[in-house]
Amino acid sequence: MRTPSLTASKKRRNAGRPSKKTDEKVKALMQVISTGAPYRICCAAVGVSYDSFMTWKREDWEFDAKVEAASAKAALRLLGKIEKQADQNFAASSWILERRFPEIFSRPEVQLNLIQQNNTVENSLVINITGTDAARIEAQAEPIRAEVAAMFEQYRPLSGGGENAAHEVEAEPVAEQPLPKVADSDQGRVITHRDGDENSQAFWRILVSARPERLIAKDTAEFAVRTLLSQTLGYKAHRMEIDFGGDPVTLEEMFSRLEELCGGSSCWQAAQRLAGYTATS
């Protein structure tokens, strides 16, 4: 019996749907990205899905570097136009810069996000707050959620007999009912983690709901920061240096460091999603 050649075996193993990430496709992408157009429009122009494009950026650092370089050149070119036409009319180039690079060229207190859904562009107002401020707000909001839940539980109409009939119930003061407390809210214990907590809603809810001065073990803080950076930045997170001076540290210190590394509130939003407070798309 004849043994198949090594070349034939490799061909059979590599058989399958060819990748769209060819040199020609990458070159075409770089050309349209250099115009300064949004990534979604650039992908549509060359026939590449936006999800595939983002996967390439996340998994291929060379491709990601090319994309960032093309975007930077577009920004410099448009800035050059603004400088040349400053005495006449630079509204068109300014419009492109504000929408293509909102995190840099929009006003810091209000950012304009272009959301393209079903070929419709919608302008959404986004107010940015720091992770520390968000943690304080969340700590104040959690007891209110618990109080509302207790009220609904107490005054909810009762159903019976297979019908949606409401029955009168005797109301009691809400203050007499013990309100459910957030786990580990103010017990003074240092927050720690276990294997698998990166997927534990209970773990993340403690982090986003506890008071900013709550203590967290240094290794747990580094674990949480590394997990959130990986969620938002992909492979770039592995190159970032995470270090806290003391042990333990406060949640405020952890989220402040996280905000510096993320360059914004995206990591705080990721923590909210892991805690189950924000719907994932």
Image (spheres, helix red, strand yellow):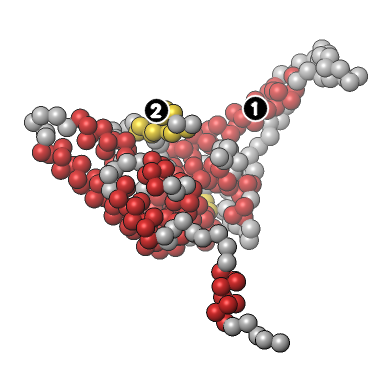
What residue lies at 71% left-to-right and 19% top-to-bottom? 173
Above or below for 106 versus 258: above
Amino acid at circle 1: Glu
Mark 2: few/some/many CA within 10 Å (<14, 14-19, 20+): few
Q: Is residue 145 left or right of residue 241?
A: right
Image quadrant where residue 183 sits: top right
Which residue was labeled with disc 2?
A: 123
Q: Amino acid at mark 2?
A: Asn
Task: Say what secondary structure mark 2 lies in.
Answer: strand
Q: Measured from the top left, where is residue 14 in percent x and y?
A: 56, 69
Q: Quadrant of residue 245?
A: bottom left
Task: Label 1, secondary structure: give it.
Answer: helix
Q: Position of residue 96 (x, y in %)?
A: 27, 36
**Crowd tier of the residue under label 1, counting other residues whose Cα lies within 10 Å: few below 14, some 14–19, many 20 or above:** some
Q: Are marks 1 and 2 in contact (CB under 8 Å)?
A: no
Q: Is 15 located above or below residue 84 in the figure?
A: below
Q: Which residue is mark 1?
A: 147
Q: Give left or right: position of 141 versus 105.
A: right
Residue at 22% x, 32% y: name it: 92
Q: Is residue 93 above or below residue 14?
A: above
The dot on residue 50 is none
Q: Residue at x 61, y 30 (%)?
A: 145
Mark-to-mark CA distance, 1 and 2: 35 Å
Residue 23 showing in the rendered view: yes
